[in-house]
Amino acid sequence: MTRVLVTGGSGDFGRACVKHLVEAGWDVIAVDQRGEEVTGGRFVRADLTNLGNVVEVMNYIDWQYSGGVDAIVHLGAIPAPGITTSSATFDNNIRATHNVFLAAKLNGIKRVVWASSETTLGIPFDIPPSQVPIDESVPARPESTYAMVKALEEQMAAHFCRWDPELTMIGLRFSNIIHEEGYAEFPGFDEDTAIRRWNLWGYVDARDAAQAVERALTVDRTGTDVYIIAAADTVSARPNRELLDAQFPGVPAVRDVGEHDTLLSIDNARRDLGYEPRHSWRHNRTDA
C-alpha cells in the first residue's frame, strides 16, 4: 500500500478523490485547514500557507513521526475566481502551492500531482478560443488572478523538475467538476447556447477526475506536464455545430469532432495517462 497525502481533502472534490483512492487501496492522509474528517482516510489539520506546517504534515501521521508519505495530491486552494479578492486569492494559492512543492523537495518526495485548471485556457472565452477542440498546445491565456496563479504553478513545476530530474509533477487542468446529483441541472443548459459558452460546454464527473488523479500518480514517467481532464462529451443536448455557430462563428476546427464530443481535448490524457471517462450526464437522463 502506497501512502499519499491529499491536500484540500475536505473540499468538494477532495472528498471524492480521497474516497476513490481509499477504495483503490491507497493509504490516504487528508489535509485541510478545516477540521472536517473524511471517509476512509486519516485527517490532519494544517495551514498550507505555513511552510513549517506543510513540511511537518508530510511526516506527522497518527500523532507521531512515522516515515512520511510516498506521493502528494495537491488540491488545497481557494477553488475559483470571485470567492474573495484577487490579492487574497493570489497570496493564498501561490504560497500554498510553492510550500507544497518545496516541502516535497525537502522531504525527498518524487511524485506530485496537483490541480491546475481549465481556466488557464482563456476561460470565460470573452475572447474566442483560437481553435476547437482546444488542447494543451494552445499557450496559456489566464483571464483572472485565479487562472494566472494556475499558469504560474505550471511554470513553477517545470523549474522544480529541472532542479531534480527524478521528480515527477503532473498538473491536471480539470474542467468544471460535477457530482452525479448535479446532472439534474443539465437540461436547463439547452435553453440558451450562451449559458455554458464560458468553458466550451465542458465538464467532468468527479469520479472521472479522481480516476485521472490515480492515473497521474501511477504513470511511469519523470518530469512535468499538464493535461486537460474533461468528460468525453459536452453538457448540451444540442450538437456542437449549432453551439459553435451560435457562439463562436469563425473559430477554426483543427479536426473533426463528433456531434457531442468534448471541445476540451482529452487526447493527450488518453494517450499518456490512459485516462478514459466512464461517466456522462447522458447516462443519467430520465427522458432517454
Image: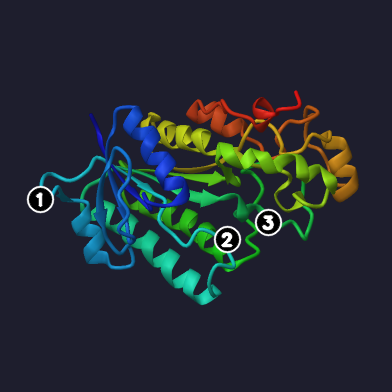
**Residue annotated with mark 2:** 147
* Residue type at the position of mark 1: Tyr
Question: Could you tell which of marks 3 and 2 lies nearer the N-terminus?
Answer: 3
* Residue type at the position of mark 2: Ala
Question: Could you tell which of marks 1 and 2 lies nearer the N-terminus?
Answer: 1
Answer with left or right where residue 278 lies relative to residue 63: right
The mark found on residue 122 in the picture is: 3
- Which of label 3 and label 1 is nearer to you? 1
Q: Residues within 10 Å of mark 3 (few under 14, many from 20)?
A: many
The foreground one among 194 and 171 is 194
Answer with left or right where residue 286 lies relative to residue 240: left
- Rendered view: 219 above or below 78: above
Using the rendered view, name the quadrant where residue 218 is placed.
top left
* Residue at (56, 28) in percent of width and height: 270
Q: State how far apart marks 3 and 2 are (Cα).
A: 9 Å
- Quarter of the figure that contains the N terminus: top left
The mark found on residue 65 in the picture is: 1
How many numbered marks, from 0 up?
Answer: 3
Q: Position of residue 148 (x, y in %)?
A: 56, 63
* Residue at (28, 68) in percent of width and height: 50
* Residue type at the position of mark 3: Gly
